[in-house]
């Protein structure tokens, strides 16, 4: 009997060892490569939407390429952000009646897709949202120690990587017809946020260590803006750029003082600016849409003096422009993508992608490829070249509003229902 018990115990131990070995191999296979690039904020490093990584996947689906898939506790339009082996994103778990539910912050293991922790941000009232928006649209930002989140229903909250709340800074509930959409970004010690509330619109700079307000610059009428602040590195120093109040404006990041402005923009602009080659690119979602290239160095109203070029046809809706490889890519509803020469604004090509319909996710790029995701979850992979070349098409089969993230040779795609990690064969 003792002999039988001993053999059973040994067999159980071997099974446990086999399971542990298999799990260890899974971690090794899925482990991000050493030195993998982080994707710390909305649109990645510097808010550019461009990754320096190589060997990114182009095709995936039933034949392989999806490393893991994680069911999310609720939908949201916030993009995943990545630091090391951790992914952060937000979600809204509805509770039956409109305006009721839980605002959630999630931390996910980049290797396995396991949800490591989930924290609720309790709001007295869920903000009103309209159109295609949701209460969890702003994307988090991380500095490798902490993750900073903004909910229009509550305000700013900071957590450490273990899910412990570090500080919170409640703000008036976001107002307007559609609700909040702008994401916080980091600049040095400052956490920058564009916010439109029931009472006013303003850009806020908070101390990222404490949440204390450093400066607050009110928006002129019209205050409505969905754009995320963009830090523009110019030869004369860094500036915070925001499209608001009918203008694209540059601000001093130390004080919030307006430095310059270019007019002609409507209210409620959604695209966030981009930059490359010494120029700033700002797109408008007014119909039929336009994009301007702005030279640095101006002060005051520089509409007549510092606009390098302007293009007025089919260039923008909600997605932000993408500057990569000397080209500027813009995407609008219906799947119409334009490729412009970034220096001159000359149209190099304009093409309707296979995936039509609406586009809310901003395109991202890496490894010579541009990834464009439609609301229906169809991903077009286009060569970042001056001649149109469709590399591949992929279908997530689910509604997709969030912009993708790129890190560790993988692409993270967040749908209403799931978070997908795409990679593997290259």
Image: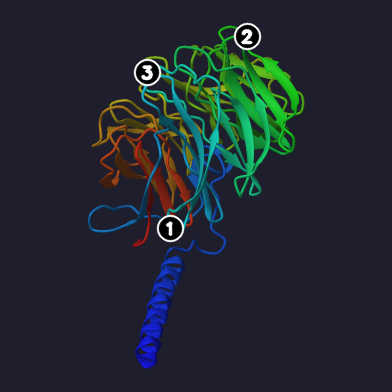
Q: Nearer the viewer, mark 2 or mark 1?
A: 1
Asked whether, in this view, residue 87 is left or right of residue 229, the answer is left
Relative to 373, say whether 137 is above or below: above
Q: Position of residue 53 (x, y in %)?
A: 49, 55
Q: Give the image quarter of residue 204.
A: top right
Relative to 387, say whether 229 is above or below: above
Q: Closer to the camera, 223 or 351?
A: 223
Q: Secondary structure at mark 3?
A: loop
Q: Position of residue 386 (x, y in %)?
A: 37, 41
For the residues labelled 3 and 1, the Cα–Cα distance comes to: 34 Å
Quarter of the N terminus within the rendering: bottom left
Instruction: Identify the residue under disc 3.
Output: 131
Q: Nearer the viewer, mark 3 or mark 2?
A: 3
First in sequence, mark 2 or 1: give its number.
1
Q: Nearer the viewer, mark 3 or mark 1?
A: 1
First in sequence, mark 3 or 2: give its number.
3
For the residues labelled 2 and 1, the Cα–Cα distance comes to: 47 Å
- Residue most toward the front? 1
Residue at the spot 43% in from the left edge and 63% down from the top edge: 30
Instruction: Identify the residue under disc 2.
Output: 220
Quarter of the C terminus within the rendering: bottom left
For the residues labelled 3 and 2, the Cα–Cα distance comes to: 25 Å
Instruction: Identify the residue under disc 1.
Output: 112
Graded by Cα atoms within 10 Å as few (under 14), some (14 to 19) or many (20 or more), the crowding at tag 1 reads some
Graded by Cα atoms within 10 Å as few (under 14), some (14 to 19) or many (20 or more), the crowding at tag 3 reads few
Q: Secondary structure at mark 1?
A: loop
């Amino acid at each position: 009997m003792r002999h039988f018990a001993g053999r059973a115990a040994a067999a159980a131990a071997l099974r446990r060892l086999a399971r542990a070995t298999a799990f260890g191999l899974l971690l090794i296979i899925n482990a991000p490569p050493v030195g993998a690039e982080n994707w710390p904020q909305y649109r990645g490093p510097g808010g550019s939407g461009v990754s320096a990584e190589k060997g990114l996947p182009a095709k995936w689906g039933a034949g392989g390429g999806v490393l893991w898939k994680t069911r999310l506790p609720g939908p949201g339009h916030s993009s995943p952000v990545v630091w090391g082996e951790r992914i952060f994103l937000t979600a809204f778990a509805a509770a039956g009646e409109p305006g009721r539910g839980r605002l959630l912050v999630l931390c996910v293991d980049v290797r396995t897709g396991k949800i490591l922790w989930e924290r609720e941000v309790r709001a007295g009232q869920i903000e009103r949202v309209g159109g295609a928006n949701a209460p969890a649209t702003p994307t988090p930002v991380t500095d490798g120690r902490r993750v900073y989140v903004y909910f229009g229903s509550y305000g700013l909250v900071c957590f450490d990587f273990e899910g412990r709340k570090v500080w919170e800074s409640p703000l008036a509930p976001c107002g307007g017809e559609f609700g909040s959409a702008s994401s916080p970004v980091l600049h040095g010690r400052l956490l920058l946020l564009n916010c439109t509330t029931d009472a006013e619109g303003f850009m806020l700079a908070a101390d990222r260590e404490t949440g204390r307000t450093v400066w607050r610059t009110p928006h002129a009428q019209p205050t409505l803006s969905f754009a995320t602040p963009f830090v523009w590195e110019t030869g004369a120093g860094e500036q915070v750029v925001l499209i608001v109040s009918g203008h694209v404006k540059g601000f001093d990041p130390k004080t919030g003082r307006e430095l310059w402005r270019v007019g002609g923009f409507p209210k409620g602009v959604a695209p966030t600016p981009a930059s490359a080659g010494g120029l700033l690119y700002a797109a408008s979602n007014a119909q039929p849409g336009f994009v301007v290239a702005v030279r640095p160095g101006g002060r005051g109203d520089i509409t007549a003096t510092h606009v390098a070029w302007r293009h007025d046809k089919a260039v923008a809706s909600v997605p932000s422009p993408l500057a990569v490889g000397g080209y500027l890519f813009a995407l609008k509803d219906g799947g119409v993508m334009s490729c412009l020469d970034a220096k001159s604004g000359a149209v190099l090509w304009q093409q309707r992608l296979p995936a039509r319909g609406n586009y809310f996710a901003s395109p991202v790029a890496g490894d010579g490829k541009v990834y464009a995701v439609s609301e229906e979850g169809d991903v077009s992979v286009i060569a970042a070249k001056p001649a149109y070349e469709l590399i591949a098409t992929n279908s997530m089969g689910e509604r997709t509003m969030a912009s993708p993230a790129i890190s560790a040779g993988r692409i993270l795609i967040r749908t209403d229902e799931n978070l997908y990690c795409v990679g593997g064969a290259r």
